[in-house]
Image: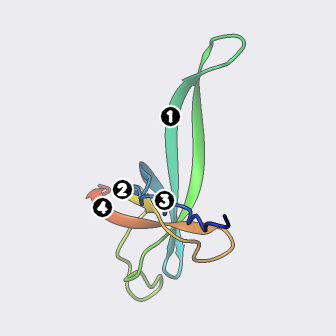
């Protein structure tokens, strides 16, 4: 009568990824990536350019000594577990270097 039913374990999905431009690399092991998108306003329908800034982790980036990601680089970031208060993204690869 008292059967135990275990909850099914949720399937792990792929992490979210975004493509953006590095706007700041002046922190150790962290860069700020601006991700832009175009979306219509919900009420008026005007197309807007929206931008979100994410802090992303870069393991081999030590700002004054060894810079691995520069401002203006196009990077691919992926979501990960929270690494600090506002950093839960990591740089997966640099798609295009700044000129």
Residue 26 placed where, x, y %?
Answer: 54, 74
13, 47: nearer the viewer: 13
Q: Secondary structure at mark 2?
A: strand
Q: Residue furthest right?
A: 43
Q: Residue furthest front?
A: 1
- Please state which of the two labelled residues, at mark 3 or mark 2, is closer to the viewer: 3
Q: Which residue is mark 3?
A: 10
N-term mark: 4 or 1: 1
N-term mark: 2 or 1: 1
Q: Which residue is mark 4?
A: 94
The residue under the point 58% across, 41% down is 51
Distance CA(mark 4)–CA(mark 1) = 19 Å
Q: Which residue is mark 2?
A: 76
The residue under the point 42% across, 75% down is 58
On-image quarter of the N terminus: bottom right
Residue 21 placed where, x, y %?
Answer: 43, 52
Q: Secondary structure at mark 4?
A: strand
Q: Which residue is mark 1?
A: 37
N-term mark: 4 or 2: 2
Figure check: 3 above or below 47? below
Q: Are there few (<14), some (14-19), or many (20+) residues within 10 Å of tag 1?
A: few
Query: Is residue 73 something that shows in the picture?
Result: no
């Amino acid at each position: 009568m008292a059967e135990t039913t275990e909850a099914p374990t949720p399937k792990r999905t792929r992490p979210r990824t975004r493509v953006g431009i590095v706007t700041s690399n002046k922190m150790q092991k962290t860069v700020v990536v601006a991700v832009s998108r175009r979306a219509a306003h919900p009420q008026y329908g005007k197309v807007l350019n929206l931008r979100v800034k994410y802090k992303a982790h870069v393991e081999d980036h030590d700002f004054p000594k060894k810079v691995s990601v520069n401002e203006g680089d196009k990077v691919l970031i992926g979501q990960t577990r929270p690494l600090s208060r506002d950093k839960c993204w990591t740089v997966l690869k640099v798609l295009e270097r700044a000129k």
